[in-house]
Image: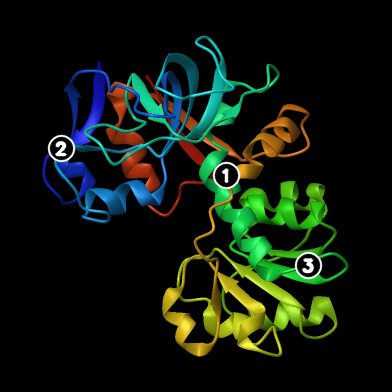
Amino acid sequence: MRALRFHSYGDPADVLRLDETAPPRPGPNQIRIAVEACGLTPADWAICGGLHTGDLPRGIGLEVSGTVDALGPGATGVQVGDHVLGPAVYTGPSAGAADQALLDVWAARPAALGPVEAAALPMAVETAYRGVAALGDVSGRTVLISGAGTTIGFAAAQIAIRLGARVIASAGETFGDRLRAAGADVVAYGEGLGKRVTTLAGGPVDLVFDSAPAGTMPELLTTVTAPAHIVTATDFAALELGVRSTGMNLRYDVLGEYADLAARGAFTIPVAATYPLENWREPVAVSRSGQARGKHLLIP
């Protein structure tokens, strides 16, 4: 099979290459899928640079959808031929950006949800739900989603609204209208964000989930009465100030629920573009440019 891998750590554009390699074999409680779509995330570039080091070569591609083609010992609740989505196993010699991939966590893909839209869900849904859950009970509270133009922030705004929050979302115009249609109040990001938010809210907001690139924290701190009212998924240096992190209690348990919502048109992650696996250099460049404007996915 083909697999996008690196044999040394470094810049993704320099170290990644499309290899021919043996298909992975599913271990205990794992399944293998024929990959139909693979989402790319900033974590892929960090892994190329040495995050989570291990034996080389390694693969990239952390979220996938596809058709089950093999079951490992003990895998239950799924059959060969089933359509699924989930986070790809990435600790071996290949990952999700390949013709076949392993999963040890998955959810059924509803028939009404296409494989591209399905593969856009796992990382954004998991991180966003974990972040909103870390805020505590958001029902009836005013929540600022900082960085709602990112896929994680876009997901978090929808999740918080679904859980009963009044959401103020900081975002540019790319997704501004879609966030408003989902029920959020939208303010522009950038200098003066804190003042815009507190003016709209009529004072400090109750809670903040931050998925924006690091650097916005000084503004966010002006929107709350205490740093602990902020949970960040990106600015870990701010933890020294009393800001909280999302924690490590992964929430893939909600992936099936949000796949069902997406199939009904009640939840979405914006898809910017898809590319054949062999054209991987283009989405790598776009994703790292800061102008991703939604999810970029490879199609084996």
User: Can residue 149 be seen from the camera position used here?
Assistant: no
Give coordinates of residue 300: x percent, y percent: 37, 19
Relative placement, left or right, of 194 versus 180 is left
**Given contact means CB atoms under 8 Å apart, are the residues at marks 2 and 1 in contact?**
no
- Say what secondary structure mark 3 lies in: loop
Relative placement, left or right, of 181 versus 293 is right
Residue topped by disc 2: 57
- Say what secondary structure mark 2 lies in: loop
Q: Mark 1: which amino acid?
A: Tyr
Q: Nearer the viewer, residue 213 or 36?
A: 36
Q: Earlier in the sequence, mark 3 or mark 1?
A: 3
Image quadrant occupied by the N terminus: top left
Give coordinates of residue 167: x percent, y percent: 78, 63
Image-quadrant location for residue 109 = top right
Relative placement, left or right, of 239 versus 49 is right
Q: Residue at x 22, y 54 (%)?
A: 49
Residue topped by disc 1: 252
Residue 137 circle label? 3
Q: Nearer the viewer, residue 48 or 33?
A: 33
Above or below residue 68? Residue 290 is below
Kindly report the distance in space between the C-alpha atoms of the residues bearing marks 2 and 3. Answer: 43 Å
Q: Residue furthest right?
A: 140
Give coordinates of residue 15: x percent, y percent: 15, 42
Kindly report the distance in space between the C-alpha atoms of the residues bearing marks 3 and 1. Answer: 19 Å
